[in-house]
Amino acid sequence: QVQLVESGGGVVQAGDSLRLSCVASGPSRSVYGMGWFRQAPGKERELVASISWTGGTTYYSDSVKGRFTISRDNAKNTEYLQMRSLQPEDTAVYYCAATQSYGAPVRESAFEYWGQGTQVTVSS
């Protein structure tokens, strides 16, 4: 059973930076593509960024492009989301997700595994 555990959330002020981490554990070579989603209160969950197994392909939503960077360290089974210039509208629960496909999926239905989420709150 694959498990994803996020960390790094917290309360920051507008303009600050934060880095989220997600460690995957379980059967080796069970996950390849990974991504980060977020869900703000009263809104649907949305894809923030995704990354392929090799890291060579990435996807960013328009709302975070240029501010967030997704990366991964396969030796540590870990993916990261570096968030810069955070704004109050970035406040949400951030979820790590993983898939058995090699690419960088952009559809929520493509991800088979999910973390429990970590809260990010940005105050103005």
Image (tube, grey):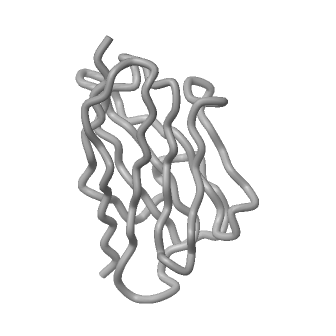
Along the line of sight, which residue is nearer the eye, 89 or 1?
89
Is 45 rendered above or below residue 87?
A: below
Location of residue 65 by image quarter: top right
Residue 82 horizontal/vertical position (percent): 51, 44
Location of residue 42 by image quarter: top left
Residue 87 horizontal/vertical position (percent): 42, 19
Residue 41 horizontal/vertical position (percent): 24, 24
Q: Is residue 61 left or right of residue 97?
A: right
Q: Residue at x 26, y 46 (%)?
A: 118
Can residue 13 be seen here? yes
Along the line of sight, which residue is nearer the eye, 19 or 39?
19
Q: Residue at x 50, y 74 (%)?
A: 31
Q: Residue at x 52, y 32 (%)?
A: 84
Is 95 rendered above or below residue 91?
A: below
Q: Residue at x 68, y 62 (%)?
A: 55
**Residue occupying the far right of the picture:** 56
Residue 36 horizontal/vertical position (percent): 46, 48
Give the position of the N terminus as an image quadrant: bottom left
Is 24 rendered above or below residue 120?
A: below
Query: What is the tally of numbered marks visible in this picture?
Result: 0
